[in-house]
Amino acid sequence: MASVTATGPLKNSDSKLQGFQLYETQKAVHEYLQFHYATSEDVMPYARLLTGDSCNEHGLAFPHKLAHVCKAHAPKASSCSVLDLGCAVGGSSFTLATFEQFERVVGVDFSESFVTAARSMQTEQSATYQRLVEGDSYEMATAKLTDVQKQHAHKCQFFVGDACTVTAAEAGGEPFDVILMANLLCRVPDPAKLLANAKALLRRGGDGVVVIASPYSWTEAFTQKDRWVGGYDDESGKFVDSDSKLRDAMAAHGFELVETTDMPFVIREHRRKFQLGISSVHVYVLR
């Protein structure tokens, strides 16, 4: 069993880091291992106390549910390739690999620490991590691939790369049929370049699909304000919403919006505190 555990408890010194540096820390790796692989009971043991789907089990297994969105909209071909752009520690990638039509699954992330963790999950099929109980007390937990993920993990490849500039050659050699961007849009320095690059990464001549999920958590820690895709007031004082701005930006590159939905996700901070986010999920087809 692989271990990505830092030496000693994960203290809060990482909070002074900004932007992309945060994703290279062991604290971030441990949090994302939990986000991608923990069971519903591990993430939200108090779900029985809550009402409403968004706060219950439907806010869990976010990476895996996005993989199912990709499956539902993939081109109707006997075999496809899929790029998990901003793959983090690989949760969506391993689920994508379980679907028969995806013969090749490539995960790319800017964080070397995340890619190392994803590769470790592929080879070892599990990893230990620390999670905060309360205060400064931590406990050990284990991230595991499911049995079906283990059977198909060999279909995955993971690379370190910049989502805004990565080429198909740098991501395994061939263009892709489907691209997934899970909560990536508001965490890159140049979202416009990210969206333009998506078209270049798709296979020519096919109905390439791009699935974009984002809570639109815009912050200048990651993206200069003049590069935000919505989330601001224009010169006349009118609010520019990210859904509309994203749709227009993708249309300019030849993409048609075919489906939108809201997808909740739950991130555990400690055993009695949780973050509930709602990502806007757009499915685009290249026409």
Image (cartoon, rainbow, N blue to C red):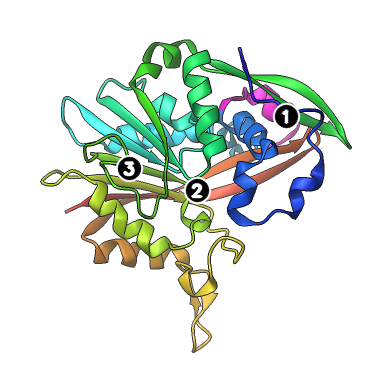
The answer for how far apart the CA atoms under marks 1 and 2 are is: 26 Å
**Kind of residue sitting beneath label 3:** Ile
In what element is the residue under mark 1? Answer: loop
Residue lying at 48% horizontally and 68% vertically, measured from the top left = 228
Crowding around mark 1 (Cα neighbors within 10 Å: few <14, some 14 to 19, many 20+) is some
Question: Between marks 3 and 2, how big is the CA–CA gap?
Answer: 13 Å
Q: Quadrant of residue 39?
A: top right
On screen, residue 132 versus residue 182, left or right, reads right
C-beta proximity under 8 Å, tags 3 and 2? no
What SS does tag 3 mark?
Answer: strand
Q: Earlier in the sequence, mark 1 or mark 2?
A: 1
The magenta region covers 37-52
- Which of the two discs, 1 and 3, sits closer to the camera? 1
Label for residue 179? Answer: 3
Q: Is 153 situated above or below 272?
A: above
In magenta segment, residue 271: no
Q: Which mark is residue 183?
A: 2
Is residue 49 highlighted in magenta?
Answer: yes
Mark before the other along the chain sequence, 1 or 3: 1
Residue 82, image x and y in percent?
Answer: 30, 35
The CA span between labels 1 and 3 is 32 Å
> Few, some or many C-alpha atoms within 10 Å of disc 2 (few <14, some 14-19, many ≥20)?
many
Q: Which residue is mark 1?
A: 6
Q: Amino acid at mark 1?
A: Ala
Q: How many marks?
A: 3
Looking at the image, residue 224 sits to the left or right of residue 74; the answer is right
Give the side of residue 25 with respect to residue 95, left or right.
Answer: right
Residue 136: tell me if it is visible: yes
Please name the residue shown 37% across and 57% down the image. Answer: 194
Q: Residue 146: x and y, percent?
A: 50, 15
Judging from the image, what secondary structure is the residue with disc 2 in?
loop
